[in-house]
Amino acid sequence: MTRWNVYVTNEIPELALDMLAKHCDMEVNRTGQVLTKNQLLEKVKGRDAVLSLLTDPIDAEVMDAAKGAKIFANYAVGYNNIDIPSATERGVMVSNTPGVLTDTTAEMTWALLFSVARRVVESDKYTRMGKYKGWGPMLFLGQDVMGKTLGVIGAGRIGLSFAKRAKAFDMKVLYSDITASPQFEQETGGQYVSLETLLQESDFVSIHTPLLPETYHLIGEKELKLMKKTAILINTSRGPVVDELALVKALQSEEIWGAGLDVYEFEPEFTAGLMELDNAILCPHIASATIDTRTKMGTIAVSNILAAMRGELPPNCLNP
Ligand code: DGY
């Protein structure tokens, strides 16, 4: 079988690159920097396949520059960075890496939820600054989690994995999505409600929807105003699902109690004011970042390329 020429747009775990190198000739962007659009347009020329990241905008222009490429294998479960209709029109396959990062992302969502509720980051900074002079009854008072109401927006794989863990804290689970999910209800005991009810009644609201035209700014000024003053918003899905300016204002005026964010509307840029907030914890899009999971994401992305090379339908092909 002729070896394919593959471009990998950033470093991914070596195990996956070794797997690819056994069957293909490859070039990896090892600069540690995300490629600019012009660099991407240049680098994809003459390739049979491209292993892309969620930071690479794979639009019609890139696909045309990569004329001859049979597959863009995205190293992510999310694929809002790829124009799938344009790929399908050109007969180019697109794949993602679902499944392996579900529990890892759910775990990080809980980590953020607890960290905001119990002010872990803020109190760590305080301690390191030498400000801790002894136990105090009013020091860093937070929010309880046990027995509270958890609102889950998006009942897909990650939302489900996250919500299942709420049983351990005797939480009432509410969820909203386009349609009700019997599986979600069965496995979490969750109750299907409107977004409005979810926002009004939840103590913790966690977002698990993909970024689609329908979910862009799903949470904006109006929705934030519906939330309790003591509520906490967590987002480990995609930044633009939240109107970040409205969120900054709601946090500044303490309309809601706190937020835990792993993703940003203008990633990697931040809306003015966000960085200065003590009631927000900001992580650098690391919800799937464990050694095991990132390795599995790499081997899945490579498996999709190798399947395409063998003339098979990649296991995680996204084209309709
Ligand atoms: C994804 O896979 O879509 C995450 O955002 C990164 O793992």
Image (cartoon, helix red, strand yellow):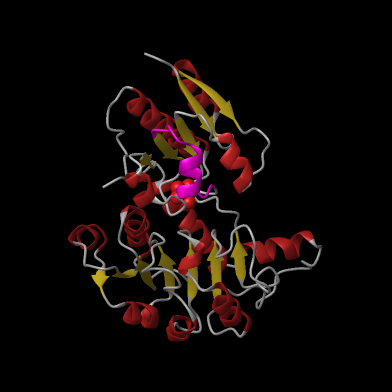
Q: Main secondary structure of the magenta part?
A: loop
Residue 168's x, y, as percent? Answer: 36, 59
- Which residue is painted at 64% across and 61% down in the image? 269
Judged left or right of residue 19, residue 99 is left
Residue 138's x, y, as percent? Answer: 66, 78
Residue 229 against residue 102 in the figure, above or below: below
Residue 100 against residue 275 in the figure, above or below: above
Toward the top, the furthest residue is 1
Residue 59's x, y, as percent? Answer: 47, 50
- Which residue is painted at 36% across and 39% down in the image? 92
Give the image quarter of residue 209: bottom left
Compare residues 267 and 149 and report the one nearer the observer: 267
Q: Quadrant of the N terminus?
A: top left
- Which residue is painted at 51% across and 74% down in the image? 243
Residue stretch rendered in magenta on the structure: 56-70
- Which residue is painted at 62% across and 33% down in the image? 29
- In the rendered image, is residue 35 in sight? no
Residue 42's x, y, as percent? Answer: 60, 37
Q: How many marks?
A: 0
Compare residues 21 and 14 and report the one nearer the observer: 21
Magenta span includes 175: no
- In the rendered image, is residue 276 in sight? yes
Judged left or right of residue 44, residue 83 is left
